[in-house]
Structures are given as C-alpha cells and as structure tokens.
Image (spheres, grey):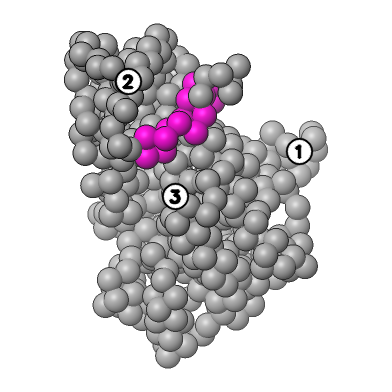
Amino acid sequence: MRTILYPEWILDGSGASPLERHAVVIDDGIIQAVTPGEVAATAGDEVIRAPGVTLLPGLINHHVHLVLPGDNSAFFEMNDLSDATLALRSAQNADISLRAGVTSVRDCGGRQAIILDARNAQASGVFQGARIVSCGWTITITGGHTRNFGGEADGPLALQQMVRRLVSRGADYIKVMASGGGTPGSLPAYPSFTVDELKVIVRTAHDLGKTVTTHCTCTAAIANAVEAGVDFIEHAMFTGPGGPSNYDPRVAESLAKSGIRVTPTLQVFRDLVDLLPPGAEHDGWQARREAHEAQIAKLHDLGVPLMAGSDAGWRATRFDTFWKELDELVICGLSPVEAVHAATGRTAEALGLADRIGSVQMGRSADLLLVHGNVAEDIRCLQHVHSVYQAGRPVVTPQERA
C-alpha cells in the first residue's frame, strides 16, 4: 500500500528553497516520487493532506550520548549504574529522539560497548528508536574527560592498540578527547594529546577505513586537531586558561582552510541558562553561551561547514528538544534552510549515508518529519510535530499529537 503525502511545503534537505504544492509518494519504506501537483491514487493508497505543514527529511542529531540522562545530574552518577540499566536508558533515549522527529543519531561515546550493542539491537528491530551511528567508547588520556567510559590510553603504541580495539568491536568512527571537559579532574581549557599522538590515531583509523573526530573545548586543542588532520571537530570552543573569550583568527582561518566539519553543540549552554536561577552561575554560563555563539558565527562567516548536534544527554540537554540546536545555528547566522541542511543532507553526507537518508528524493528511505508551519521562515516550527515516519512506518501521527 502506498502513502501519498500532500504537505504545503517541502524542504528536501539539500539546502535548496522549499518546494510548494508537491506530493511525496512512499511505497515499501522508500520514497518513490516527489512530484508537483496531484498523483493518481489507486485502491488501497493512503492519501494524507497536510495544509499548513512542512515536510522535511527526518533530522539527524550529529552529537548525542545515549547513556546519559540529560537531567543535569552529576556525570559520575552513571558509575553506579549497571550496563543493563544504561542499555535500557539508551533505548529509551533513542525512542524519545525518534518521536521528536530525529530519525538518526550519531552517538559520541558511552561506557565500553553498550552503544555498539544498542545500535545492533535497534537495527535488528529489538526496539523502536532512532538509527544509531556509534564510536563505541571515547579515547582519552589517563585521568582525562570521560575516563569512566573505559578508553584511557597514552603514547603511540597504546593509542594504536585502542583504535584497533574499537574498529574490531565495530565502531563506526573514532572519537578522541583532544582536551579536557566536564569530567571532574579533567582540564577543559588545556589540550590533552600531543599533535604526534593525534596523528597516530588519525593514521591508524584512516588505514582501517574510519574517520576521526576530536572533542575540542579550547583553542590549543583545535589547533592540534587541524594540524593532525582529523575529519571532524566537536564543540570547537575557543577557550583558554583565561576564560571563554580566546578566539584566535589564525587558528580559525586554518580550520576553515582545512575543510574540517564542526559540530558546535550550542544548545548545552542555552539549556543551562534556561535551567539555572538568576545568580553568578547563571551569568557565567550566559557569558560562555554568548562567547561560543560569537565564535561559531565567525566560523560560519569563514565558510566552516557546520553540523547540527545538540550533545543530548550531557548536562541538561534532553533528546526531544533538538529544534533548539537548529535555532542556535540560526542565531549564529545560518538561514533556517541552511540549519535544516546542517541536520539532514550535510550530516548524511558526512556520515557516508547520503544514498540512504538525509534527503527527500526518489530512492531514499522514507525517514520523514512533518511539522506545523513554514520552517523556511521560522526554524522554531520544528518543535510543533505533526507526524514522523521512519522507513515509511508512521511513528507519530496527528492523532497522537492531538
């Protein structure tokens, strides 16, 4: 049985202007046609007319941590939880993501192989949830950020072995903590690995057909990652020992020339500012938010390709509010259409999945999000879900949202 959808607008995920008065035909989980005007329906076809609604590809959240709760609880509290509990939490978070219109997620690290197993279970139909791309666990220095995930390694040989372990276990890509972070005892304003150590990781991963991304919360770490030739940078915060305003135009320009894609994870600061009561802590996070937005706006002006990833699970960032990350990208200077592209077509291409997901075109999986309003004019329409499809299967219908 075919499904024929008639939205008012279509954003196809390519970054192109919206289509109007087009039909999308789905059959057997695949988009069969995107065509102007009416389609001749046959007996058994389901015809859905959605005036005032935008249809777009299912969103791809390029940075999440499925094992984390996103409720601002202490990071080390997960140490007291069993692998089974974290696996169940991961399945729940994948389902929450899907029901909010995020049909695929790129998990950026969990404890040991929990997310790799969750990825396989989801793909096998064990539970409903967003498709999962996973790095497995993260690689960090001894005592570094996310050390409780199990990936501490120092020196060329240990790093080479860790990359090989991850690839053998089935990691889709390699994630490296190139600076400290929010883990107590780590140093977010300082780099972790040396350039030579990062080069070992990159060379070993590339030789095995895997890409490398680096967590960078300081300017020096960004510079190291660019010199090492990584494929992606997470956060790209220009901070230093003196605070969050450590923007270095030379580092930014070298990043832009490299073509490395950046996932700025802007929503984390926004969520903390929204959560905290007035006071010094609130003001501190607001200052960091404003500094990061200004720095990412400069990277956008330089032509750095930006990806949409919210860091869901970390601190107070939930899995059902991904629209805020796209809103933050718009604040940084992207148009709503560009922000959607950063969460669909561009991300699918970066993940090597553009032949399957990330666009509304013939032959692609029918991962679709329909929302009330014109997204091309107001990115905040993304929070008003009309319906969600994954591989042509309705996950959320208008009746469920009523």
Q: Which residues are magenta?
A: 381-396
Residue beneath disc 1: 276
Crowding at mark 2 (Cα within 10 Å: few <14, some 14-19, many 20+): few
Residue beneath disc 3: 131
User: Which comes sooner in the sequence, label 2 or label 1?
Assistant: 2
Residue that lies at the very extreme toward the front in this rendered image: 43
Residue that lies at the very extreme toward the bottom in this rendered image: 157
The answer to whether any part of residue 391 appears in the image is: yes
Distance, label 2 to label 3, CA atoms, is 29 Å
Q: Nearest to the eye among marks 2 and 1: give it.
A: 2
Looking at this view, is 236 or 142 the one in front?
Answer: 142
Helix, strand or loop status at disc 2: loop
Rendering coords of residue 302 (x, y %): 30, 43
Quadrant of the rendering where the C terminus is positioned: top right
Q: Residue at x 57, y 66 (%)?
A: 114
Crowding at mark 3 (Cα within 10 Å: few <14, some 14-19, many 20+): many
The answer to whether any part of residue 382 appears in the image is: no
Dominant secondary structure of the residues highlighted in magenta in the image: strand
Residue beneath disc 2: 44
Looking at this view, is 373 or 265 the one in front?
Answer: 373
Q: Is residue 240 above or below residue 44?
A: below
> In the image, 122: left or right of 270?
left
Pointers 2 and 3 in contact (C-beta within 8 Å): no
Q: Residue at x 48, y 46 (%)?
A: 130
Q: Quadrant of residue 84?
A: bottom right
Distance, label 3 to label 1, CA atoms, is 32 Å
Distance, label 2 to label 1, CA atoms, is 53 Å
